Image: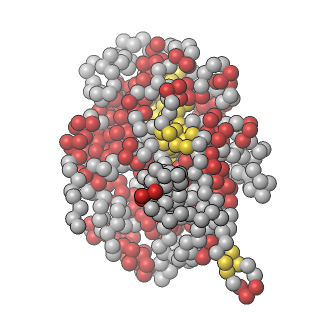
C-alpha cells in the first residue's frame, strides 16, 4: 500500500459513535468463561462500521473527505473480483441487448450499468463520478475555477469511511484477544490450518451481505483478528483487500432474494407494515410528537426536515434525519448549532421505534426474521451434535447444512458458487457482516430492551457451551424445538449465552428455573430452552409461503 495511505488508528477517536465491547480483564474472563465450561461454538453478527449518510437531504454541500484508505482498499477488492473499472475509462451506454455479449460489464444485473458491477453491493464504486455535491470538486487555483476532478479522500453516499475501517479493525482485535489469546479457541496463525492438512473454512465461516460497506467491514474485522496475514498482502500497517486475501479468508455473500440478514421484505404480510409510513401514525404519542415539533422548529434544518417528514417513507420518517446527523458526529464533524446531542438521541429513539415496533409481535418476528433465526439454530445444533462425537480432525467435520443455501463466494476473478471442496464445514466461529436491521431485530427477539438506534459496529454474539461436569441426567422432556433441529439431538449439558455489545441478554424463556445454568444464572439458557424460545419464530418454507400471503400486483 502506498506510504501516503494512513495506517489504522489503534484507539477510537473521542467522538466515536461505535458500539461498546466488554473490557477483557482477568476478572471478566474468569467470570464469563469458567474452567468447567467448554466453549463449543461462537456466532458473531456485526453491523458495519461508520459510514457517510445514505443520502444527503438536510444540507446540499456537506463535504465528506474521510475515505482515502477505504477507496484504495475497495479498488483492490474490485480488481480482485474482476470488476474494477478505471475512472478514466468511458463506460458504454446502457443497453440490455448487450447482455451475454463480448463486453463482460453487461450482465443481467448491469444492463443499466449501475456502478459497473456484476452485482449491486452499494450505490457507489471506485469509478466515482462527481455527483450533485461539490465535494467531488477540487479547486485548481486560478480564478477559483473548479474542475470535475475526483479527490481520493472523497466519500460517496453510504460508503464505509476510514473511521469505519478502524472501528471494525478494533472489533476484530477484540475477537482475537478473547477467542485466540485468552481462550485459545482458535489457531493464532491462519496458515497453521493448511500446514496440518485442514482448510481455514474447516473451523471459520465468513458471510457478508452484498453491500460494499459490509464487505469492507468484514475485511477490516478479519485484518484485526489476523494482522499480517496473508503475508503477501501485508505492508506493515494494513492488509490489502486483494486476491491473496480472498484465497486465505473465503467470504460468502448472497443475492438479495436469498439473503436472510435483511428483513424478509418479499413477504407481503411483513413488508406492508413498512411501506408508506407517515408521521401521523406515531405522533399520537406525546414523546414522539415532542421530537417532531422540536425538530421542525429548528432554524438550521427545520424547514427541510418538515418537508421530508410530510412525505410517506419506508420504515421511518425520522431515520433519514437521524442518519445524516449521527454520521456527522461519527466523523468528528459539527452538528448544526441549534441541534443538541439530546435531540439527536431522541431522533434515534423515534427512528428505532418506527422501524422495530412490529418486531415485538411474534408473527412479524416469524415472517421477517424467522429464516435468520433458523440459520442460527441449525448451526448451533450441528455444533452440539459434533461436540458429542468428539471428532479429532477438523477435516472430518461435516459441511454446513441447508443454512448455507444461496451462498456465493467472493473469489479471485469473480463471484461464483463454491466448488465442492470449498463448501464450509460446521464452524467453531461464524462471522456475519450485516446491518442495523440485522442486529437490532434479532436482539429484540432474544430479549433486548434498548430503545435506541444501534450504534455502528454493534455485535450480537451467540455462544454455545458444554458443562464438563454435567451428568446428563437433567435432560428436559418434550420441550418444543424447531423442525430443523434433529429430534434425537441430546441437549443436556449444553448452554447458550447471547450478548449484545457489552451486555449479556436475558432471554425471557430462560428465566424459568430449570431452563438456565444453575451456577451461571438465568442469562445462560439451557440449549433446550434456547430452542424452545425460537421454535415459534421459525416457520417451514411451506408455512412461510402461506403466512406471507400474495404480494399485490402493482397498478399501471
Give the residue drawn at x 50%, y 39%: 416
Task: Choose top left, top right, bottom left or bottom right for residue 513.
Answer: top left
Give the residue drawn at x 74%, y 42%: 234
User: Height in image: 538 above or below 485?
Assistant: below
The colouring scheme, among rainbow, by chain, secondary structure or one colour, is secondary structure
Residue 291 rendering spot, x and y as whole percentages: 39, 70
Of residues 237 and 232, the one nearer the viewer is 232
Give the residue drawn at x 41%, y 27%: 401
Q: For residue 64, say whether it is visible.
A: yes
Residue 89 rendering spot, x and y as whole percentages: 63, 63
Of residues 65 and 340, the one nearer the viewer is 65
Of residues 139 and 359, the one nearer the viewer is 139
Residue 549 rendering spot, x and y as whole percentages: 20, 48
The quarter of the image holding the C terminus is: bottom left
User: Height in image: 30 above or below 310?
Assistant: above
User: Height in image: 37 above or below 372?
Assistant: above
Q: In the rendered view, does 440 fall on the left or right side of 174?
A: left
Furthest-bottom residue in view?
143
Residue 390 rendering spot, x and y as whole percentages: 50, 13
Q: State the count of labels.
A: 0
Furthest-front residue in view?
102
Q: For residue 441, say whether it is visible.
A: no
User: Height in image: 543 above or below 555?
Assistant: above
Q: In the rendered view, does 73 fall on the left or right side of 300?
A: right
Amino acid at each position: 500500500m502506498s506510504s501516503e495511505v494512513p495506517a489504522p488508528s489503534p484507539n477510537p477517536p473521542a467522538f466515536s459513535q461505535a458500539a461498546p465491547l466488554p473490557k477483557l480483564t482477568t476478572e471478566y474472563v474468569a467470570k464469563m468463561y469458567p474452567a468447567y465450561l467448554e466453549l463449543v461454538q461462537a456466532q458473531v453478527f456485526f453491523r458495519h462500521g461508520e459510514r457517510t449518510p445514505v443520502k444527503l437531504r438536510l444540507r446540499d454541500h456537506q463535504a465528506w473527505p474521510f475515505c482515502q484508505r477505504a477507496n484504495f482498499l475497495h479498488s483492490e477488492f474490485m480488481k480482485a473480483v474482476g470488476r474494477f473499472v478505471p475512472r478514466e475509462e468511458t463506460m458504454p451506454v446502457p443497453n440490455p441487448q448487450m447482455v451475454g455479449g463480448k463486453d463482460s460489464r453487461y450482465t443481467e444485473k448491469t444492463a443499466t450499468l449501475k456502478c459497473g458491477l456484476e452485482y449491486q453491493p452499494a450505490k457507489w464504486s471506485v469509478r466515482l463520478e462527481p455527483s450533485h455535491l461539490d465535494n467531488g470538486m477540487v479547486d485548481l487555483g486560478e480564478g477559483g475555477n473548479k474542475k470535475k476532478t475526483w479527490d481520493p479522500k472523497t466519500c460517496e453516499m453510504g460508503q464505509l469511511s476510514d473511521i469505519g475501517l478502524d472501528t471494525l479493525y478494533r472489533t476484530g482485535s477484540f475477537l482475537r484477544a478473547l477467542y485466540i489469546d485468552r481462550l485459545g479457541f482458535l489457531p493464532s496463525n491462519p496458515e497453521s490450518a493448511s500446514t496440518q492438512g485442514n482448510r481455514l473454512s474447516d473451523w471459520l465461516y465468513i458471510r457478508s451481505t452484498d453491500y460494499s460497506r459490509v464487505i469492507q467491514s468484514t475485511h477490516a474485522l478479519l485484518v484485526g483478528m489476523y494482522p499480517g496475514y496473508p503475508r503477501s498482502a501485508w505492508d506493515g500497517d494494513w492488509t490489502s483487500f486483494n486476491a491473496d486475501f480472498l484465497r486465505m479468508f473465503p467470504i460468502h455473500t448472497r443475492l438479495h432474494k436469498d439473503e436472510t440478514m435483511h428483513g424478509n421484505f418479499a413477504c407481503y404480510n411483513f413488508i406492508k407494515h413498512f411501506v408508506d409510513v407517515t408521521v401521523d401514525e406515531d405522533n399520537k404519542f406525546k414523546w414522539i410528537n415532542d421530537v417532531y415539533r422540536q425538530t421542525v422548529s429548528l432554524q438550521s434544518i427545520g424547514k427541510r426536515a418538515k418537508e421530508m417528514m410530510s412525505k410517506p417513507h419506508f420504515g421511518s420518517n425520522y431515520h433519514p434525519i437521524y442518519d445524516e446527523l449521527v454520521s456527522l458526529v461519527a466523523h468528528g464533524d459539527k452538528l448544526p448549532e441549534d441541534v443538541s446531542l439530546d435531540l439527536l438521541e431522541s431522533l434515534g429513539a423515534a427512528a428505532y421505534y418506527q422501524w422495530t415496533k412490529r418486531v415485538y409481535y411474534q408473527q412479524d418476528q416469524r415472517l421477517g426474521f424467522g429464516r435468520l433465526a433458523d440459520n442460527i439454530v441449525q448451526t448451533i445444533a450441528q455444533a452440539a451434535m459434533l461436540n458429542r462425537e468428539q471428532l479429532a480432525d477438523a477435516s472430518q467435520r461435516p459441511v454446513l447444512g441447508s443454512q448455507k443455501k444461496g451462498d456465493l463466494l467472493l473469489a479471485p476473478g469473480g463471484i461464483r458458487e463454491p466448488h465442492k471442496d470449498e463448501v464450509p464445514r460446521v464452524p467453531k466461529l461464524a462471522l456475519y457482516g450485516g446491518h442495523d436491521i440485522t442486529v437490532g431485530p434479532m436482539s429484540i427477539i432474544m430479549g433486548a430492551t434498548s430503545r435506541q438506534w444501534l450504534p455502528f459496529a454493534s455485535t450480537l454474539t451467540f455462544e454455545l457451551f458444554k458443562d464438563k461436569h454435567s451428568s446428563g441426567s437433567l435432560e428436559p422432556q418434550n420441550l418444543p424445538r424447531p423442525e430443523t433441529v434433529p429430534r434425537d439431538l441430546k441437549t443436556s449439558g449444553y448452554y447458550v449465552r447471547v450478548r449484545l455489545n457489552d451486555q449479556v441478554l436475558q432471554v425471557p424463556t430462560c428465566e424459568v428455573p430449570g431452563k438456565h445454568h444453575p451456577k451461571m444464572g438465568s442469562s445462560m439458557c439451557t440449549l433446550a430452552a434456547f430452542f424452545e424460545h425460537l421454535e415459534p419464530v421459525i416457520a417451514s418454507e411451506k408455512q412461510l409461503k402461506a403466512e406471507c400471503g400474495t404480494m399485490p400486483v402493482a397498478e399501471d
